[in-house]
Amino acid sequence: MTVFYFYLWVFAAVGIVPIKTHIFATPENEPFLSFSDTVKTPTESGCTDSLSPHLELSTYTRNITTVSNDTQAYVNQALALAAAFNHDEALRSIQKALLYDSECAMCRWIMAYNLSPNINRPLTQEKLKVAQNTMDKLTQFKGTAVETLLIYAMKKRFASNRTTENGYLFDQEYAAEMGKIANRFQKDADVLAWYGQALMETSPWKYYDRMGKLLPAMRRAKWAFDSALTLAPSHPLALHLNIHLVEPSNHPCDGLDVASKLNLTTLRRIGMGHLVHMPGHIYLRCGQYDRSSKANADGIRLDKEYFEKCKISERSYNGYYHELYYCHKHAFLIFSASMEGRRALSTATAQSLISKCHINVVAKELQGVFQTYVSWPWQTFLRFGNWKAILKILPPASTTSLSKLENGLHSPSKQKRVLSREQTQFPNYGTVMLHFAQGFAYASLASETSENHTQICMQAANSYQQFHGGAQDPRIRGKHVFMVTMGTLLDIAKYTLLGRFAANCPEFSTFAYINKSLSREPQWYWEKAVFTQDRLPYMEPPYWPMNVRSCLGAFLLQQEPPKAQEAEKVFLEDLKHFPENGWSLKGLMISLKLQKKPYEEVEQRFRRAWKNSDILLKSSCF
């Protein structure tokens, strides 16, 4: 409701700000792009109202037609915030700009630009109405030639007959108009970046064909970004979107130069945390996990400073930026830190992800992508072999049947209900995944001790039974998680659990509720889990927060005799998917040793990868 009332307020504000009649400007008066060191700004500070304070963001400037230096300052702030995808704060900034110059036509263009759908955020009905009203009222104005063309392109994007269902047609028309403007103003880095962005928004998250080649429209987008960066090497939006365009490719490390440039020149100011985090996308894909962790930790820190300045509580719902991008950095940090072997940081960040993010709110607006995060704390425990922590968690009473087990290793009375509000708000997937995690934990404990082996395996079998029942429910399996269904992720969980269970509790294969599933050798289940994970589309960070292939390799090395040669191939393949990750480097080193092959170079690589680790790794998988 907070977001609704904010847009309602914007809607009202747009209607009461007058625009006088002016003659269109001539090309001689076109604005220019510059990166000056000083910008005159208003002196307000602190979020005392619904308008944006002066955040002292950047040296980014785009001169527009306005009579007010204060308006110019807030326009610069709005564009910088938009480059960092902090669109709601950018809207508040542009409202502040209009207070100083109510006739600012480009302010309204920037307002509509920030209300527009983007690669991460669909257009809502409220925003559509505000944007249409904004552009409808912009009939006569003063502005330069490029401003005039930009405004009319935006008017086409938000024509009165646009709806939330047919919007893609208008986005395509807008992109075509932006292409014409970019061809005419090829020395305007902003226009080039906006053109590339418009093209990406016609096909969000679908930039390549099946052969891994850029789609024709995306090739034009790449040209636009490269051209913008030739003119302005530190252009924040061009750097940002270039990373998004390159990261899902077959050659993500082609983006290292852009990532490093953004890392060096990014605007490390509050409100810009997402831009600071962005190089982490490329660093993660290129195996530079320490740099990815730092980028995300820095982004989280800047977000916290921003929330503090604007009196935004981390624990209450405060808009899309807080719920999507702040939480997104947490997920990224969990994954990158885990690839470094940093158990404490990964575990703490996973708990923070659940306690500070309203996953259910964002999931509804972003096609469910955050729903799977409810299980990340448990999967982080699995990653680091913290079985006892998993077994202390009590599932919701309506679904638990642990009491059926007599003399269990952990009786319900000794378990702690530590599910967060988010985890209980997704009882289906969350509960099913908890049963998976606990089954995996029990099956793992079965190999670590001979005492109570049968009893522990019985616990594992019971957890599998409960997991399997929920995982087969079509109401759960059919739920979409952005580009996949929950069923695909649950299949990875199933094969992973059965692989561990079949290896450590083979005597339970005759149980009536397990024998239909447990009909193959353990290696088959691990290979099936790997196959299923490989079929997942690209996601940042990955949908499944563990590289299952490193566990397959560990299983192969545990055989008598060890299948070292086969394991070596598995680890080499995993290092293609997750370059220089310490888990598979450790496994590769062990497999080479067993084959009496040279391993010293791999050992050095492992030590570099594990330099920040707080765990002693004996195998490639706990």
Image: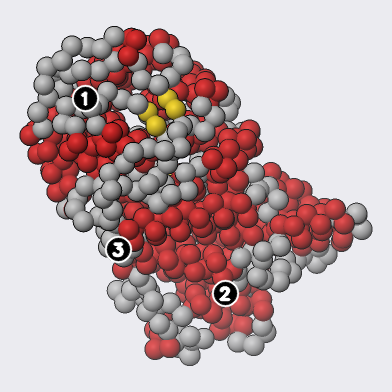
Label 3 sits on residue: 313
Badge 2: residue crowd in 10 Å (few <14, some 14–19, many ≥20): some
Badge 1: residue crowd in 10 Å (few <14, some 14–19, many ≥20): many
Real-space Cα separation, disc 1 to disc 3, in angstroms: 34 Å
User: What percent of the width, then of the height, locates residue 149?
Assistant: 29, 15
Label 2 sits on residue: 386
Q: Earlier in the sequence, mark 3 or mark 2?
A: 3
Query: What residue is rendered at 26% in x and 34% in y?
Result: 71
**Residue 326: quarter of image:** bottom left
Query: What residue is rendered at 59% in x and 82% in y?
Result: 454
User: What percent of the width, then of the height, locates residue 468?
Assistant: 44, 63
Which of label 1 and label 2 is nearer to you? 1
In the image, residue 580 above or below residue 10: below
Label 1 sits on residue: 105
The type of residue carrying mark 3 is Ser
The type of residue carrying mark 2 is Asn
Real-space Cα separation, disc 1 to disc 2, in angstroms: 58 Å
Local SS, label 1: helix
Q: Nearer the viewer, residue 486 or 312?
A: 312
Which of label 1 and label 3 is nearer to you? 1
User: What percent of the width, then of the height, locates residue 30?
Assistant: 34, 15
Q: Earlier in the sequence, mark 1 or mark 3?
A: 1
In the image, residue 445 above or below residue 28: below
Local SS, label 2: loop
- Contact (Cβ within 8 Å) of mark 3 with mark 2: no
In the image, residue 23 above or below residue 523: above
